[in-house]
Image (cartoon, rainbow, N blue to C red):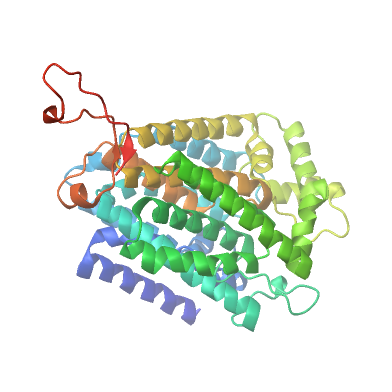
Amino acid sequence: MLFLGVLLFMEAVILCALVVLREPKLLIPAVVLGLPIEYFGTQALGVLPEGGFTGAIRALLNPGKAAILATLVVATVRVRHNPARLFPDSAVIIPIVALLAVVVLGVAWSDFPTAPENSILIMPMYVAFVFVAPSLIEDRRDVERIVGAFLLVAAMLALIAIAQRLFGVFNWRTILIQSDAYSYRSNATFADPNNLARFLAISMSLGVGLILTTGPRRQTVYLAVPLLALGAVGIVATASRSGWLMLILSTFLVVMVSPIERYTKAKLVAVAGGSLAALLTLLLLQGGTDAERVRSLASGVQVIGQREFLIRAGWEMFKDNPFVGVGSGNYQHSLIVSYLYIVPDWARTTLSHTSLISLLAELGIVGVLAFSMVVVRVGLVTVRAYFATSLAYNRLIVGWIGASLIGILLHSQSEGRLLDEPYLWVLLAILVAMETNLARRPATGRQAVHQPRVAAAEPLPASAAAPGEVVPLRAARVD
């Protein structure tokens, strides 16, 4: 307990230093940098349980979540003379609040043997972060700091993952050591290797988009390029099939929405597809654990393994409670108590790995409708924010957010962790900031000089035309 107390004290000191010595806006990059450090919270499971007050303390052992709490306090104090800034004029706010209300009300009809789980207790903090974070993301410099934090922490995590797999360094979760006694599914500081693969997929697709859109700048040369080199090996070390697929999908979507020429996109897709096919061929010829996991992707429904009976159990819960489900966070308890007959003898897990099934089982039709409203609104806001700006950098960031949200949604159908995925709420906060603060703002000063711009059709100078001649339009281009 003394160690945990010292850790919390150190987190508080670091966060105060960010606010007092530098500036409050650095709290948002601090959130991005700190969220992957799930080591302390996972190791404290034997001391601090999942739910209740002690569970909330255990959640704050994650530096990123502690930074979220600090952001709420600092942002509230910062705009205390104009509290209206804490309520952004965004189309996604009301649907998110409605979903939160359904989740909170779902606790009332759930049959919890103890206090609610952390995933429910901490969701109001995530929603509040979406409200207040845009007040700290006001210009391009703020966005570039956040982008730099994503690239930096992803490169560091990839390096740790490589060391875990190749050299056996920091193999802190024995459950990830497979039956051959030497292969380790790298997880870095995440509790689960699939979550590490998800984060690497998000960050690597961002790196690809930056290189295509902004060219050789300091952030791409010193952060994006090293990340892609390390991340390509690190994500393989996770042995996460769903993570590999998410990387392919997210990168493809980012390339498609990047403000570059269509011919360039076609060439990139063709080259990437050929390179991927060659790498898969080499991997399959080499054999080993990773090759077996790749082959399993062609095994149909068998690839989901234990998830098959978990999906069936969730469907039974939904059929028995179609309107409001079994209650928020009550899937595992209901499975053990009322649906144990579905669990085979060999099963080693009782947690749902499919987010849609979790919504159906725990919140029923009401929860699915509330979540669907969020998905529709977020999709519309992403499209509007993308086309509301002519700045190539802003379009890239909005497009990357959209691609990442799609990736998280699809990845959660295999590995769970949707509403309790903290980076989901970080991305939503950035999206709200882009929608309300940046998407419609023209470039000025330094931004006007260095900001790539998607140029609209414009007339040639009058001097270029002969008297009485019709002035043609230049074709739209990317400067």
Count of numbered marks: 0
Q: Residue furthest top?
A: 468
Eyeballing the image, is 19 above or below 376? below
Q: Is residue 219 left or right of residue 175?
A: left
Q: Residue at x 41, y 33 (%)?
A: 381
Place of residue 343 in the rendered image (x, y in percent of width and height, measured from the top left): 84, 51
Q: Is residue 100 visible?
A: yes
Q: Is residue 352 left or right of residue 42?
A: right
Place of residue 216 in the rendered image (x, y in percent of width and height, measured from the top left): 34, 61
Q: Nearer the viewer, residue 369 or 249?
A: 249
Q: Residue at x 52, y 34 (%)?
A: 375
Q: Residue at x 72, y 33 (%)?
A: 321
Q: Is residue 62 visible?
A: no
Picture quarter containing residue 188?
bottom right
Q: Residue at x 33, y 47 (%)?
A: 393
Q: Nearer the viewer, residue 340 or 224?
A: 224
Q: Nearer the viewer, residue 34 or 477?
A: 477
Eyeballing the image, is 188 above or below 365? below
Picture quarter containing residue 346?
bottom right
Eyeballing the image, is 219 above or below 340? below
Q: Is residue 180 left or right of residue 163?
A: right
**Quadrant of the drawing holding the C terminus:** top left
Place of residue 389 in the rendered image (x, y in percent of width and height, measured from the top left): 30, 36
Place of residue 41 in the rendered image (x, y in percent of width and height, measured from the top left): 54, 68
